[in-house]
Amino acid sequence: MTLIKSISGIRGTIGGKPGENLSPLDVVKYAAAYAYWIKSENENAKVVIGRDARISGEMIADLVKSTLIGMGCDIIDLGLSTTPTVEVMVTEEKAAGGIIITASHNPAQWNALKLLNNKGEFISDEIGRSILEIADKNEFDFATINHLGNIRFKDDAIEEHIEMITKLPLVDVDAIKSKNFNVIIDCVNSTGGIALPKLLSTLGVENVTELYCEPNGKFPHNPEPLPENITEICSKIENGNFHLGIVVDPDVDRLMFICEDGTPFGEEYTLVSIADYVLQHKKGSTVSNLSSTRALKDVTLNNECKHFEAAVGEVNVVNKMKEVGAVIGGEGNGGVIYPDLHYGRDALVGIALFLSHLAKFAGSAKMLRRTYPDYTISKNKIELNPTIDVDKILAEIQARYQNNEINTIDGVKIYFDKEWVQLRKSNTEPIIRIYAEADSPSKADNLAKKIISDIKEIL
């Protein structure tokens, strides 16, 4: 059982002792600390709340709402919603912040509080540290009887979000509708089961087969949208007659497509393909994190634009996008950030842009995938224990490869022409991640194995 306190919020497993797991006492403490910060920074103490459908969500949401009311904050409760919907509603409702109750792609025993600022974006490192300090010191006062907060329920937020998407200039509803796409979706029994059918209907996609679209929180498989977790929908596509498969994670901020033959389009290539479409119509920079495929850089250069890398973490990608004025960005885990709508990973806008791209492309999803450089990332990890000095390992590796180009803004990333390997400590799990990319699976695996061998020598 685990409790992880980070700058972006608090995440943990349900049950067990306070301080060691995501217990009700921990939820109240950190919600109160967030509310205290909100009230210290804003005359307006209005907060948007939404949650995914995981089983513990209602319990955690009730605790959060009661705590915020007790702190004197007014609440706009979206109920079952998506992470990007909560984000856009913060600005639409002119709120001071937002809390998303979701553990994203983590298994069902996990839940979390994701904390937003008044722009509907994840709070900064500095603010996150401040909130953690407030919580640790119990530096908050609850409101007196005449200053308790109020709650307002809003049940049409997803529809408003979808309307914003369909109004975007690069979302071509007529082109999508003209293709009469036959689509199958897997929403892992969470809030994608509410949002995706509504989005697809609005985009004119009438032939939709739904898998696991009942938002009851009973995940039928590991909810992270990776090839090994989506074998059922791939099999149905292979044996059916579909143009495309779409898979989202429980809070609908990560997105994966499946080609008409049942093969994954590739989680890394979700952003690559959408960025290619955007750049064809609007020139500008792109940004991805250091653990994402170099295919985005290739596509960006092919469109005569500049590509930039950021440290892992959505807030880091967003900050870099703002710094360079990027027109599209995100992460290779299927996270698409389209600033013309908002600065947050958004699977719904990603679907609309991809379908617009596919509708205008003279071919199938498989044919579209073949137009992009073909790289493979080998993803590995080493479990950590208290005796391992991670900083020493990274310094030793850096010294061994000092003649190569090296990036140290997030762990250590070493470049070998068009190949690379990155070592970094995870922000959410007690592990070191070792990612390597090359133009074939064997090359990527061998590169990763070489670095793992180096680490074992150091240890």
Image (cartoon, helix red, strand yellow):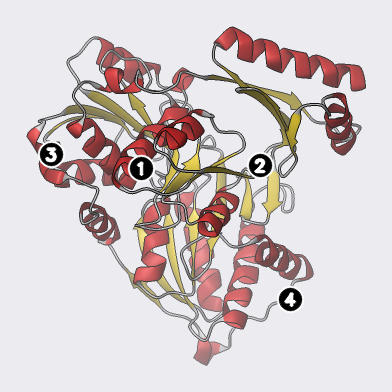
Instruction: Name the foreground residue: 423 vs 91.
Output: 423
- Kindly report the distance in space between the C-alpha atoms of the residues bearing marks 2 and 4: 26 Å
- Kindly report the distance in space between the C-alpha atoms of the residues bearing marks 3 and 2: 41 Å
Of the residues under marks 3 and 1, which one precedes in the sequence?
3
Task: Indicate the secondary structure of the residue bearing disc 1.
Answer: helix
Do labels 3 and 2 touch, CB within 8 Å?
no
| Residue located 34% across and 21% down the image | 371
User: Quick check: 198 above or below 439?
Assistant: below
Residue 90: where, in percent of width, then height? 41, 67
- Kindly report the distance in space between the C-alpha atoms of the residues bearing marks 1 and 4: 48 Å
Q: Residues within 10 Å of mark 4 (few under 14, many from 20)?
A: few
Residue 173: where, in percent of width, then height? 15, 45
Where the C terminus falls, by quadrant? top right
Instruction: Name the foreground residue: 3 vs 317.
Output: 317
Q: Which residue is mark 2?
A: 428
Q: Which residue type does callout 4 highlight?
A: Glu
Q: Residues within 10 Å of mark 1 (few under 14, many from 20)?
A: many
Q: Which residue is mark 3?
A: 175
Residue 111: where, in percent of width, then height? 55, 46
Q: Which residue type does callout 2 highlight?
A: Thr
Q: Which residue is mark 1?
A: 279
Tell me: 277 left or right of 381. left
Q: Which residue is mark 4?
A: 139
Instruction: Name the foreground residue: 417 vs 267.
Output: 417
Q: Residues within 10 Å of mark 3 (few under 14, many from 20)?
A: some
Residue 28: where, in percent of width, then height? 62, 64
Of the residues under marks 2 and 1, which one precedes in the sequence?
1
